[in-house]
Image: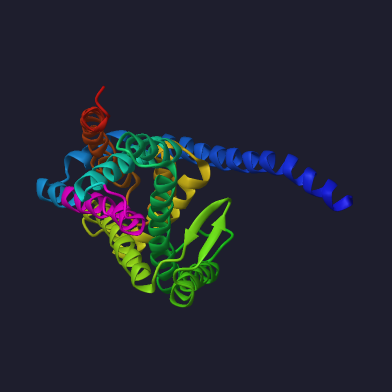
Amino acid sequence: MKTRTARLAHRRWWPWLRRIAVWAFFGLVAWLLVNQARAIDWQEVFDAMRALPAATLWLAGALAAGSFGTYSTYDLLGRHLTHHPLGARTVMGVTFISYAFNLNLGSLVGGVAFRYRLYSRLGLPNGTITRVLGFSMLTNWLGYLVVAGAAFCFWPLVLPAEWKIGNGGLRILGAVLLLLAAAYFVLCAFASGHVFRLRHYPFKVPSLRMALLQLAMSCLNWALIGGVIWVLLQGAVAYHAVLAVLLVAAVAGVVTHVPAGLGVLEAVFLALLSHEVAQGRLLGVLLVYRGLYYLLPLGMATVAYFVTELRARRWRHATSPKP
């Protein structure tokens, strides 16, 4: 009886505690941003943006395009596993649209809602969509575990003195992330084909070969994203440091549930790299990065979304039984 009462109390209080923690973190980020904004010379920011060479912008844009192209292949793995009939170009188009909206509007709207909307309009059942979506998310975060684990374990950041966690703590965190990734590969090696049920949804363990393909694709994507910011910084900071800060910012954005990580990305970069790069220049680079990696793809995805909706409507009319 006491155990049941404790469980009920936990269910009642845990959501509130989680919300309080999220809002406290969000408040801390907002406070950091306000404090940083007061000290920033905004003219310096705009001058830094205008000073970026055209060749640098083109190279950063090419890396951003490579990242989106890589991410757009994630759902092809789910297509291979589920054997659904949609063509590769259609699947990549849906993934691109979902990813662009995911970055700007959050995972529930972009990554989930848009996939369900578009795939269901194209004739896929919800069960298949769930499997494709779940495997795509697994692919993305598998690469994160390995890239972040390696970065934190072997090239730890120089953290501000007031931070509680030091280089030793980062190395431990990196090792834990690598162990989690290794556990997944062990599972795929020895339990390939086994079906687990996660909250009533079946998960079929992929083969080790598929897991390695997931790893290669996701690691490449994270590496390309870090490359965009590194190129815009024109080598002012070591690549592994830029990548590590990006990985910290990515988790911070997920924890706060802020659409597009708005303000979170900037706060983390300013906190961790402002001792190496002038604040105005760093913020200018991040604003250009947002334009290249967030806003430009969002505009393209908006057009592609309406085109996909139109094609889906035509496909449904063409395949519906005639009276």
Depth check, front residue: 44 or 149? 149
Quarter-of-image position of residue 80: bottom left
Q: Residue at x 24, y 47 (%)?
A: 92
Quarter-of-image position of residue 74: bottom left
In percent of width and height, residue 64 lies at: 22, 49
Eyeballing the image, is 131 above or below 122?
Answer: below
Q: Classify the position of the C terminus by image quarter.
A: top left
Q: Judge whether residue 70 is colored magenta.
A: yes
Q: Which residues are magenta?
A: 61-85
Q: Is residue 186 left or right of residue 266?
A: right
Depth check, front residue: 241 or 62? 62
Eyeballing the image, is 270 above or below 305?
Answer: below
Depth check, front residue: 177 or 11? 11
Find the residue positioned furthest to the top. Answer: 323
In percent of width and height, residue 138 lies at: 43, 57
Quarter-of-image position of residue 206: bottom left
Eyeballing the image, is 322 above or below 18?
Answer: above
Q: Judge whether residue 99 is colored magenta.
A: no
Q: Residue at x 56, y 57 (%)?
A: 197
Q: Is residue 210 visible?
A: yes
Find the residue positioned furthest to the left. Answer: 55
Q: Residue at x 36, y 55 (%)?
A: 82
Eyeballing the image, is 312 above or below 212?
Answer: above
In percent of width and height, residue 85 lies at: 27, 48
